[in-house]
Amino acid sequence: MNNPTTVLHDAFFAPRQKINVKSTIPSALKKCQETGRLEAFKLNWTPDCGKDAPHVYWDSDVAKVLEGMAYVTDEAPAFAAQLDELVSLVISAQQPDGYLNTHYLVTEPEKRWSNLFYNHELYCAGHLTEAAVARFEMTGKRDFLDAMCRYCDYICEVFGKDGKAGYPGHEELELALVKLYKVTGNQKYLDQAKLFIDRRGTTPNYFVENENIPENRLAIFQAHKPVREQKEAVGHCVRALYLYSAMADVAAETGDNELLNACETLFDDLAERKIFITGGIGSQQLEEVIGGEGDQVPERSYTESCAAIAMVLFSSRMLKITGKVKYADMIERACYNCALAGISLSGDKFFYSNPHAAHKNAERQEFTANIRKPWHQTSCCPTNYCRFLPQLQNFCYRTAANSLSVDIPAAATVRTDGYSAEIASEYPYDGTVKISCTSGKITKLAVRIPSWCRKFDVPQSGTIENNYWYGSLQAGETLLFKFDMPVEKVFSRIPSISSQAAICRGPLVYCVEQPHDSELSPFEILLDDESNFELTDLDIPEIKCKAVKFDALQIKMPEKLYSAEKPQIRKTSALAIPYALWQNRGEVEMTVFMPCNHNLNQQ
């Protein structure tokens, strides 16, 4: 077996992977066809085609769909021939010098590399490269990979040590170059990735000197100071997290501890001061920026789907490098909550941003809608799911020939050259986990003890270090782990919600959603100290889940906008569902945080 294989068969992630093959990838392909994204590679446009011209980021949308198709060719053989045809279409647009960008080739052919800050040439090159690497790794076919090597050779020539001193405005190519280096062994790709990172934010600033960008805008694109000097995560969320991912990659490949320390500092700033409870990132729609500490207001949360996915990608890299449990905790928080909230259970409707409170009368624009849409004009999020969902198992398990790290114990089968293992669980709804070795031997087994878990039972045969249980397992043996999962009210120091609480259980954040015509609005619910929480089975279209039924108080406010009349209060009950599953039953109001009626212990 050349590569370890992990197959999920849990009730939370596995259905998403199946629907990705059945619905998400086909619907994204259809939209790419309908909107002209595929046709663009035929280069039939002319410079005067106006608004119908290929957009600066179209190539990246197609690339992410192709990457997703590459990951699932084994389970969806029908995709293989279709992928071959699409790859041929894409590389047919490549120029003799290696350049490949549908926007610039037909609308501004004389302006290559003239607007790195705002336009997406290098970003698109990165996603095309990632797709080519994925196809090569999954199928062994080289045509796409060879084409992207020619493109990246050209980029290295243009932006190499003796070339233009620029670097990507929208970070992405940096991490793609590291992937290309790892599959080809060509050192110049790693060197170029490092060069792009080392140049970023240095003086004289390339964007100020060459593209007339005001200095006060540099932080939005993480170009305000050298990356090793950046102590605070700022600016555009996805750009930042793709940059941090690339920094982690380069640090791992070169042994650059200073760069790795910068990654850890930036992660801690996000995790300790700027994260939403669901693992979402981004508190402001304006410029799609991370925001500051205390800006995580549910009613105006932006928390783009791509940002939650990027947080998983960054955290996964840091986990592999350091083994520190805080990164696995973040992967779990994002994967079970914000990262999957952005896609419907049917797999063909998407949130661009993910509200944490949805009022029925709130005016929200396309990117901040309270209803998932089949597509978005800027379609980075829908296409990102095509490639994210097939990788979910890689965020749960880290494998090698004789070792297994169980970071998220979703039910799965794992096979390597050295062993086969079965992980049986009903996670994330139950904390009982059985790990069985069915053949061979796992000489190093690591099982994460989640940071949210305060009571657990683990085998006495192992040791605990840094929130991981370590032991071994051989054929015919089974180990049992139990992680207690009480329903809890979770509070926050964020000023706007400091008197409120969210309902959580294990890795899941819950929310209350109600139809618009319901007699009980989620915003009328008051959590009480005496609230009893009870688990109940609930069928949502395409999936079964564990909901939380609880007692509460309903506060009925006067109809006037402002009134001295006292609100009416009565006892009621409500149902909370996992946040990742909301808005799959029609238009609803929803909230994660609810005000509390509690008596604080006085000292």
Image: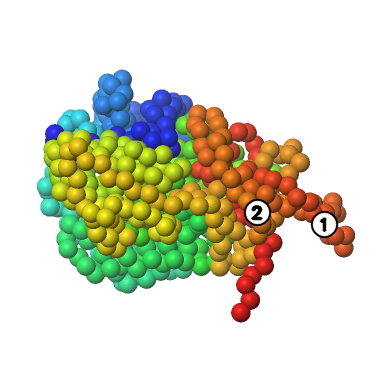
Residue farthest right in this picture: 565
Vertical position of residue 309 compared to residue 52: above or below? below
Circle 2 sits on which residue? 531
| Distance Cα–Cα, label 1 vs label 2 | 20 Å
> Residue 372 in the image: x percent, y percent?
56, 37
- Which residue is found at the position 60% from the left and 49% from the top? 533
- Which residue is found at the position 20% from the left and 58% from the top? 252
- Does the image show residue 38? yes
- Which residue is found at the position 30% from the left and 39% from the top? 423
Q: Left or right: where does residue 299 sit relative to residue 59?
A: right
Name the colouring of the figure. Answer: rainbow
> Residue 406 in the image: x percent, y percent?
29, 48
Which-is-in-front pick, marks 1 and 2?
A: 2
- Does the image show residue 6? no
Residue 132: quarter of image: top left
SS at mark 1 in the image: loop
Circle 1 sits on which residue? 567
Vertical position of residue 597 compared to residue 441: above or below? below
> Residue 280 in the image: x percent, y percent?
48, 53
**Nearer to the camera, 268 or 417:** 417
Give the residue type at disc 2: Ser
> Residue 96 in the image: x percent, y percent?
20, 37
Residue 491: image tag: none
Callout 2: 10 Å neighbours few (<14), some, many (20+)? Answer: some
Residue 560: quarter of image: bottom right
Q: How many marks?
A: 2
Vertical position of residue 87 compared to residue 119: above or below? above
Residue farthest front in this picture: 460
- Which residue is found at the position 21% from the left and 41% from the top? 477
Give the residue type at disc 1: Pro
**Nearer to the camera, 184 or 37:** 184
SS at mark 2 in the image: loop
